[in-house]
Image: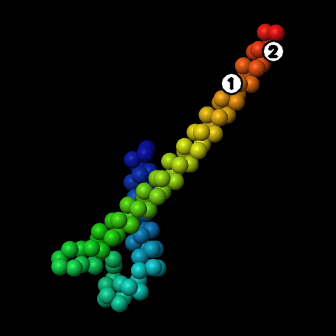
C-alpha cells in the first residue's frame, strides 16, 4: 500500500512541478530563452533543466514526507502521553481500592 501511495505522490508532485510551478513561476524565463519546458534547458549537451526538474520533484516529496513523519511523531507522542496518563489513573484507582 505504501508503494502505491508513494507512486501516486510522485506522480502528483511531478505534475505539480511540470504543470503548475514551471508554467506559473518559470514561464517568463523560459519564454526569454525560447524554450517550452524546463527539461529543454541544456548547456554543452547537458540537460540541466531535467536535473532542475528532478531536484524540484525530490525537494517537494522530501518536504511532504518530512511533514508527514513530523505529524506522525507528534501523534505518537500524544498517544504515549495519553497512555501514561491512563496507566497512572489506573494505578491510583487500584491503590485506592486496596486501601
Nearest the eye: 22 or 77: 77
Give the Cα distance between marks 2 and 1.
Answer: 14 Å
Nearest the eye: 2 or 43: 43
Who's the residue at 45% across and 74% down the image? Answer: 21
Could you tell which of marks 2 and 1 lies nearer the N-terminus? 1
Question: Splitting the image into 4 quarters, where does residue 76 fall?
Answer: top right
Mark 1 burial class by Cα count in 10 Å: few <14, some 14-19, many 20+: few
- Which quadrant: the N terminus? top left
- Let me know if residue 98 appears in the view: yes
The image shows residue 72 at horizontal and vertical percentages of 55, 45
Who's the residue at 76% across and 20% down the image? Answer: 92
**Which mark is drawn over residue 13?**
none
Q: Is 90 rendered above or below residue 60?
A: above
| Secondary structure state at the residue bearing disc 1 | helix
**Which mark is drawn over residue 87?**
1
Question: Splitting the image into 4 quarters, where does residue 89 fall?
Answer: top right
Question: Splitting the image into 4 quarters, where does residue 18 fall?
Answer: bottom left
Report the number of numbered marks: 2
The image shows residue 32 at horizontal and vertical percentages of 35, 90
The image shows residue 12 at horizontal and vertical percentages of 44, 62
| Secondary structure state at the residue bearing disc 2 | helix
Who's the residue at 46% across and 74% down the image? Answer: 20
- The residue indicated by pointer 2 is 96
- Which quadrant: the C terminus? top right
Residue 90 placement, left or right of 26: right
Considering every residue shown, the one lying at the far top of the view is 98
Who's the residue at 60% across and 42% down the image? Answer: 75
The image shows residue 67 at horizontal and vertical percentages of 52, 53
Cβ atoms under marks 2 and 1 closer than 8 Å: no
Mark 2 burial class by Cα count in 10 Å: few <14, some 14-19, many 20+: few
Q: Is 54 rendered above or below residue 48?
A: above
Amino acid at each position: 500500500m505504501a508503494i502505491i501511495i508513494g507512486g501516486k505522490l510522485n506522480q502528483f508532485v511531478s505534475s505539480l512541478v511540470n504543470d503548475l510551478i514551471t508554467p506559473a513561476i518559470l514561464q517568463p524565463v523560459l519564454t526569454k530563452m525560447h524554450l517550452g519546458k524546463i527539461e529543454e534547458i541544456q548547456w554543452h549537451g547537458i540537460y540541466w533543466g531535467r536535473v532542475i526538474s528532478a531536484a524540484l520533484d525530490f525537494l517537494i516529496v522530501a518536504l511532504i514526507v518530512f511533514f508527514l513523519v513530523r505529524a506522525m511523531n507528534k501523534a505518537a507522542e500524544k498517544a504515549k502521553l495519553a497512555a501514561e496518563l491512563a496507566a497512572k489513573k489506573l494505578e491510583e484507582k487500584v491503590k485506592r481500592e486496596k486501601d
